[in-house]
Amino acid sequence: MGIRAGEDRDRRERGRPQWPTTEAEAVALQERLREAADLTAEGPAPDQVRTVAGVDVAYADGGGLVAAAVTLDAATLDVVEESVHAGRTDFPYVPGLLAFRELPSVTAALDGLAHRPDVIVCDGYGLAHPRRAGLAVHLGVLTGIPCFGVAKTPFLFDFEQPGHERGSFSPLTIEGEEVGRALRTQDGVKPVFVSVGSGIGLEHATALTLRLAPTYRQPETTRRADHLAGRHLAASGQK
């Protein structure tokens, strides 16, 4: 890691909040992060994005976990660099606050990257969340990097099935408010669920998701991060 990268990492770590230990603390921090999210920026256009980092977490019994961050070249989808962080999730399982089980380890994995990616994609939600503050919102605000979520399963929102062709989408709504899109990344396969976190608009997030998913349902960022976290968890002997 170069001097500048090390200095950037130190600044990021100094800017981290104290992680909450109670539900009340988590709700208060979540509200502050939601209010700080940049929901007006369009973010970089997909053809201007050079690198994209994907993050994912593999869980072990007993509270252990491995968080992985994988940066891809946006043009070739080749791996540029990888980072993993083994930790524990001490925050309790509380619906709507699941981000706090992963945030300490995910941000540590991102801090381990030598170069700042242009965009972060997480396996989860952004605005498509009961408090409009899913994992992508937290990561976008805490890192200052445009971030959005691509989830595999529907959450607490309404949607109609998009068309069967790749690129078809339909809105995700909560109480009539559009919070994301159900996006078909491959002909005839189940859609994924795209929602912005901070620093990028839904149009660009949708287009970038398609660019990152040329062959499979999930974007390559998620697939690579998932595989990396799983490999390291298995190598550690945890189950």
Image: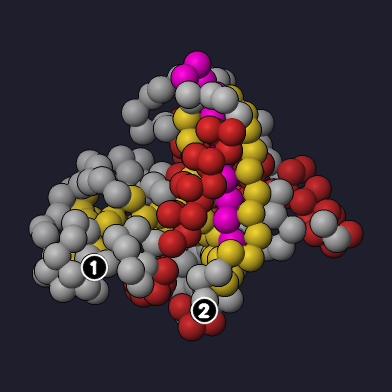
Residue type for callout 1: Gln
Label 1 Cα neighbours within 10 Å, binned few <14 / some 14-19 / many ≥20: many
Of helix, strand and loop, which one carries label 1? loop
Residue 121 in the image, given as x and y percentages of width and height:
47, 58
Magenta region: which residues? 61-71
Q: Is residue 108 above or below residue 205?
A: above
Mostly what secondary structure, the magenta segment? strand
Q: Is residue 230 visible?
A: yes
Residue picked out by circle 1 = 186
Q: Which mark is residue 96?
A: none
Depth order, front residue of 167/34: 167
Of helix, strand and loop, which one carries label 2? loop
Depth order, front residue of 143/105: 105
Instruction: Say left or right for 147 vs 173.
Output: right
The Cα–Cα distance between marks 1 and 2, rounded to whole angstroms, is 19 Å
Q: Residue at x 48, y 83 (%)?
A: 47
Label 2 Cα neighbours within 10 Å, binned few <14 / some 14-19 / many ≥20: some
Residue picked out by circle 2 = 75
Q: Is residue 64 magenta?
A: yes
Q: Is residue 92 above or below residue 84?
A: above
Q: Is residue 92 magenta?
A: no
Residue 97 in the image, given as x and y percentages of width and height:
42, 31
Instruction: Say left or right for 58 vs 170.
Output: right
Q: Is residue 12 above or below residue 183?
A: above
Instruction: Say left or right for 159 vs 229.
Output: left
